[in-house]
Amino acid sequence: MTVRTFIYGSCVSRDTFERLPRDFELLGYVARQSLVSAFTPSTTRTLPTADTRSDFQRRMITNDWESSLERQLREHADRVDLLLWDLCDERVGLRRLERLSRRPTMHAWATRSVDSIRAGVDAELEEFRLVPFASGRHRVLFLHALRRFGTLLDELGLRQRTLLLAPAWATHTSEGSRVPTSFGLDPARANRLFHDYHSTASQITGVDLVTIHDVAADPHHAWGPAPFHYTDSVYNDLSRRIVEAAVSISSHRQPETHRPSPTPHVGSGGVQPDASVPTSQQETVDDLVHRLVHEPASLWSGERVQMAARQQKMVEKFRTRNGLRDLEEVYETLMAWARERATNRPMTYFVVNPGSAGSHWLQEMMADAGNMNPCGDVYLPPAFMTAGASLGDTPRGLLFDASHLLQAYRPIDQSLKLPLINTAHIRGWGQHQLMPDPRRLILLSRDPLDVVISRTFRKPDYRAQQFSKEDDFTYLQRNIQFVKNFYERGKNSTPDAIVRYEDLRRDPRTQITKLGQTLGVPFAGERALDVDARGGSNKYTGPPVEIPEYLRTVAIKELSELRSRLDYA
């Protein structure tokens, strides 16, 4: 039985293939090509001259430059019995070559490989940003490429015929000496990093993993000592596992009628980042998020102009926190994260409140007690709301998720998996209700009188920024109307849970536990006490403020009906 084999990988797959029985026939070979490079458009730039006499090296460098993997797989798919894949070529990182459109997946990338370095190609690309293996940026790009690869494998009927070879890197040779690092990557650290990459790749694409943990490097290997240049016993073990898998694949293989698709994909120059999103809607999302990052002033006007300055600060914090070079990288990373988050849609919790109700305190308790990612007060620009009303669920989710991820407190690997919490103080409920499912609305209620007094007299910085020309009476009336509008606009909405600030202050552990039961989330109530103990109660700590009695009387009178309706009178 001839087993026609296609290899996508490097030393691990190729050296193992040499040990396979003679009935394994090499059908095609793609090496030195990161999955990221393979599934983004090929560059329009001229390939630097490769200083090498090796036709193989020159061909692999050219194929990477042209993002050839998909084209080559399509050419051979009907005849492939087995696809061997390994991730060894991911280890040296990527070069970002050029921006081909405003979409973040439309950058051209080149693999920084051992061949491109030795042939002098990488030296010609030093002006371009290096994205190291296992960096936050690399992980996001790799995840996006994985999903495209998984889709391609399914389309071509290759998923069940693919094996991901994932032997551990050897820390020592068979003679007991330590194995040198590979481009500064220590074998022990590489094993930790590749474990995550391998398990994620298998989970997303659905292909089987072939793992071996008891490994040693061959000090006399033909290509020299390296963590992935193994002894014969390791290769023999891998070969045996591959033969067993090939027999199983052959026995379960069904006749196929695959026809290569005439539609070009990203690797060959240009399908949408998310095929489920109409082009016009994708462009709307891309444009709005691009403006949010680059030109926030274009999204806020009038009395909201201060929001643009606030947004700029958020963008700069995001850039610094994630080690990004410029605003364009902020935009690209943000959109890539939003797309990745959209694949599993974790919950978004909205703590609906009129402000001065302890929302940040509740958010901190929820985050600690339920392992959630707080975002603070996320305010969507009016243009986002207008566009969101006409977008489908998927593009609307991308738009809103990008806004939330920009302010997420926790690191990237958690931001994509954990539920998010938004505590924005807004008078209407439209922003919350436009968010696609899954979402939950938590109404945080507090005595309207206390809210109005706090908003009017205990937030001097906000008042100075927004309403510095208003006297106490006018500003009090503004806040009374704000609180009335908040409850009026929400009276026909049904929140998923209601929390009273006063109850939360009295017994935070019990109230958080009850909230978790209502939401179906196993909140650890004792964590609420930890938050309270470290002073996260959002309590006013500024200098004493003397509130004129006649203004308090005005507020009591104006709010009497509302307080009665909410059982505060």
Image (cartoon, rainbow, N blue to C red):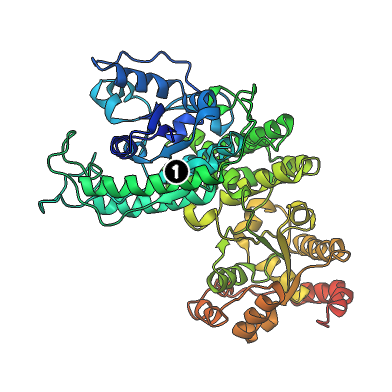
Left or right: 263 as drawn, with respect to 418: right
Where, by quadrant of the figure, is residue 65 drawn? top left
Left or right: 84 as drawn, with respect to 79: left
Please provide percent x and percent y for residue 216: 20, 51
Left or right: 100 as drawn, with respect to 50: right
Please provide percent x and percent y for residue 78: 55, 28
Above or below, 509 against 215 in this view is: below
Which residue is label 1 attached to?
246
Left or right: 408 as drawn, with respect to 350: left
Above or below, 213 against 71 in this view is: below
Quarter of the image with the C terminus in it: bottom right
Q: Is residue 96 visible?
A: yes
Which residue is depicted at the point 61% across and 23% down?
A: 264
Dot 1: within a 10 Å radius of its alpha carbon, few (fewer than 14), some, or many (20 or more) residues? many
Quarter of the image with the N terminus in it: top left
Looking at the rendered structure, the secondary structure element under dot 1 is helix
Q: How many discs mark residues in the rendered view?
A: 1
